[in-house]
Amino acid sequence: MSHTIAAVSTGNVVSAIGIIRLTGDDCAAIGAAVFTCKNGKPLKEAPNRKLILGTLHDAEGRLIDSCCAIYTRGPHSYTGEDTLEFHCHGSPAVLAAGLEALYAAGAKPARRGEFTKRAFLNGHLDLTQAEAVIDLIEADSAEAAANAAGQVDGALRKKLNPIYDDLTDLCSHFHAVLDYPDEDIEDFGLASYESNLRSDAKDLLSLLGTYNQGKILRSGVAAAIVGKPNVGKSSLLNALAGYDRVIVTEVAGTTRDTVEEAVMVGSTRLRLIDTAGIRETDDRIEAMGVERSRQAVQNADLVIFVCDGSQPLTKEDEAVMDFCCEHEHAIALINKSDLGSAVVPSDLPFMYVIRICAKTGAGLDLLAGVVDEMFASTTPCDGSILTNARQYDAIRRAHGAMESALQGLRLGLTPDAVLTDVEEAMAAMGEVTGATVREDITARIFERFCVGK
């Protein structure tokens, strides 16, 4: 028996339609206490997965809304349990009143992610699919949504299951021979499994190789805008953001801390980080900002160096350039092109140099083209890209354990010693799919979810 939970699943915003969702053994009985079918029949007799017109009312019988209900019987529901939804007019006041009526009738408030957690615990989703649900909800690009939808459909599980099955076959064969020596079981030999182990380790390594692309797909490209003070870094961020996100003045050192804003540049999502101007300073607060700027460059996926093209380069410019040129992905922008051309592209030691005017927007289309070229997707966004740091760490450990098993096999270690590494790889992979996941890991995963999902 599972207690019945209820929540608004469409958020606390004004909309055309708002949905209140219940799931649990008593959802039909609780729903019937607050909903009257227009056809006069009991709610528990409603056809499966069919919208039924009726009225929603409170414990005193006062009308809350004319709406529709849809009753889905388990196990053929999202959670695997009986599920009931009320499709109401999308007023937050109506939804709140309906929810209060359900609580008064015996439903309990749903916790964050509890609907999806029940789907996982009831075997309707594996952990890769469950985690992808919140990624799909939070996706802010078509590519991110497509990859999350592919994972909800089981794309990642389908890549991992054959590997897990190979390791299961190896371990089960060894233990069968060991535990049942008198049975007619084919002799166990590690060498016969070496080819599969190598192939599986290679597949895991290939999956790990998609993570950098996956991080960008999920979170965007961390792009640090750097340069000496007063070259137009904040003006550039404002131009790309489309509004005055950062204060811009002629006073050097106005920006004293890193400021972040997510924007679409071309077809690439950038997490722009406007940094304090990098220079030597005796101002203790500004110096702290400069140090954070240096850290932002080190942690960034992309560095955008900005200089004032209307003035000759200075030693401060050169010092910042030297720092930026060490980065794998770097672009130089010669700003203030409307005020003159004291700096030409050949003066800057960067592969990509673009003349722009942050004030007018000139040249920003060229910047978008370069960014798209740098971070073009190399793997289809079909769910096969690894985007989750927790999953990446588990698969990294699984791959390491399989490499240890292969090394033990080459060194001629006993089967039981090799299988210790194989079982370690299986345990790590189980953390990804949920095959052996611990309760504390499960709880941490669903903390990311919103109430009602």
Image: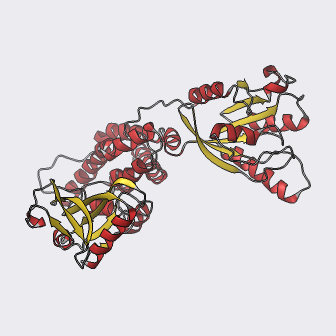
Task: Name the spot of residue 111 as percent of width and height, x first.
Answer: 37, 69
Task: Name the spot of residue 227 as percent of width and height, x first.
Answer: 79, 39
Q: In which quarter of the image is the C terminus?
A: bottom left
Check the image and name the residue furthest to the front.
62
Q: Quadrant of the N terminus?
A: bottom left
Is residue 159 at all visible to an observer of this figure? yes
Identify the residue at image location x=40%, y=59%: 11
Left or right of 154? Residue 401 is right
Task: Name the spot of residue 307 as percent of width and height, x first.
Answer: 81, 33
Residue 85, relative to residue 318: is it above or below? below
Nearer to me, 217 or 69 = 69
Identify the residue at image location x=34%, y=41%: 150
Nearer to me, 99 or 216 = 99
Q: In which quarter of the image is residue 301?
A: top right
Identify the residue at image location x=90%, y=51%: 281
Structure colour scheme: secondary structure
Left or right of 21? Residue 393 is right
Q: In which quarter of the image is residue 103?
A: bottom left
Is residue 326 at all visible to an observer of this figure? no
Task: Name the spot of residue 16 as percent of width and height, x first.
Answer: 35, 52
Left or right of 83? Residue 236 is right
Residue 32, relative to residue 86: is it above or below? below
Nearer to me, 451 or 75 = 451
